[in-house]
Image (cartoon, helix red, strand yellow):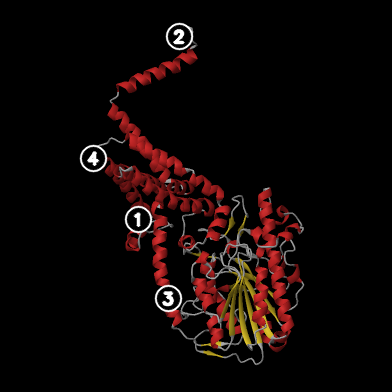
Amino acid sequence: MANMPFSLSLPIDVVKRLIITLRAVPHAVVATLVLAFVLLLISSLLAVPAGIYAWQRPTLLNYLSLAFTIGLFVAAGLLIRSRVLLIAFGLIVLVLNLIEIVSLVSFGGLISLGGVEAILYVDPHEAREFVVEHIAVIGLGLLIVPLFIGLVLLKGRVDRLRTTPRLLCAAAVTLLPASLFTAELVRTGSPDDIYLPTRVVEHYVAYLGANPLTSTISGIATAVAAQQEFEALRITRANFRFTAEESARAGRQIYVVVVGESSRRRNWGLYGYGRDTTPHLLGQSGLITFRNVISPATVTSLSLPQSFYFASQSREGQPQIAKSFVSAFRAAGFKTFWLSNQGTHRSAVGNQIGVLMQEADTVRTTNYGFWNSVLDGVLLAEFDRAIQDPAERKLVIVHTLGSHTIYGQRYPAEWRALPLHPPAHEVHTNTKLSPPDAEAIDDYDRSIRYTDWLLNEFISRMKQLDQDGAMVYFSDHGQRLIDDPSHVKGHGYSDFKPYDVEIPLIVWTSDRFSASHPDKLAAMVDNRCKRVSTVDLAASMLDLAAIKVSPIDPAPSFFGPHYQIGPRRVLLINHRFEQYDNNDRAVPAPAPGC
């Protein structure tokens, strides 16, 4: 050892002294330190969502929430001595955490009620595509499971703590951070994201704030309670009857409403996009393009009910009508059809869409799992059957899959060879696109071209009928599409961006309609540059078909004269309202002649 270099002998001496010191420490103390370290590791794994949340929102309150969460799990580890029970408890938490981690990492916030509902009513096809879309985050989350089990087994070997110190330690690790957490809440007030373990403590938690540990459990409890409320609402709607006057217009009539999915107008050539994504519609006569339209919400489950029902969050004092304009058309003597490529009950957004579908006389579905790769073109056969029905007056609702993720599955495979010019980085707001990002935008733009083709097919078939009527197309909401360095795409986020709700609204009128109702055509042309929200779609459709329903006010019709809407509000997935018409928000460039 005398000839050993100093740089090597010093660390060896330090290690020897450390070993001698540890040997002098009582075995019980070493075991307790090891137990504390293992419990801290276990609790940290179980508190990963709280850690991510604090990292995303670095405030003292969130750091204390993280400490409180870890303390709760340390206490649970101290009090649950059985390895089997602790593993069972931990696996339940880890499953809930995985849901929360995907929401935090992929959607930028704690899971919302809408997200919980999507999970509760998921089917295998939905689950498969969701996993594919978020495979990286889910894979990292699953890596925690074997590590957690190994630590629990190790904890069982070193856990020799007696009952009294066990209880004292459990109390200390929970009461101290809980006291600091509560004191900070009293000082700063409640944060925006509030999730409740049960509705009983709603008002208390609204003051104390939210612990990320409980948000998934809270969402499940709330979703189950919401379903009970929904059943009561279903009964109310079943007992409601419209008092409607038949349309004053004589002869055969047909009105078609095509509901798009996740289609943002920024990527439509019809609205000035740098790529020709709408070649068919650009060549159509009788087309009116509304330039400044938004959806009333950022997800289908919240947007479509507001568009189809007459009760409107932007129209204070308007009567609460229990059924949609579909039932109003039925009451006015129209035969109604609902054709859907989104599954029988649209399980990904709950049963609201299912109830809407049930209001129609005839319901046809071409897809029995929302996320299946069934192209919207299959709707054409059902559309042909509907428009050829011998009924004098018809309303046809067509619900498409449009441009929902995964974008590459929304158009025919052979369309992948279609050239797209210019390249994505030359037409997109984000000029620093990676090759996968550019490919995603290409897929999205092809899905818009497929929608353009489909709408052209619908119009061509309606032209052959030579009847009085019109087709209205709008999207349920917008879409984020890698618009900034965050590389985010999709919808349903807890924060708000303008492109979440900026949608196309297009009306095609038949030659007979245009010739017979020049006043209506003039009103639509006059309104095409005004601020519009599809929250007024129901009143507008009645106005379009000259149907009167008491006590509906016809004024909120964007197809009628003198249409005006105040500052437009948007409902987010966390049920928070956001003002769209802010002074600092850019307004899309108007069409020529506006």
Say which element carries label 3: helix
- Identify the mark nearer the N-term, 3 or 2: 2
Q: Are marks 3 and 2 in contact (CB under 8 Å)?
A: no
Say which element carries label 1: helix
The residue pinned by badge 2 equals 1
| Label placed on residue 208 | 1
Q: Is residue 364 above or below residue 5?
A: below
Identify the residue at image location x=51%, y=62%. 123
Compute the Cα span from label 1 to label 3: 32 Å
Q: Position of residue 80 (x, y in %)?
A: 31, 45
Residue type for callout 1: Leu
Q: Is residue 581 left or right of residue 28?
A: right
| Label placed on residue 163 | 4
| Label placed on residue 233 | 3
Q: Are marks 2 and 1 in contact (CB under 8 Å)?
A: no
Say which element carries label 4: helix
Q: Position of residue 98 (x, y in %)?
A: 47, 50
- Identify the mark nearer the N-term, 2 or 4: 2
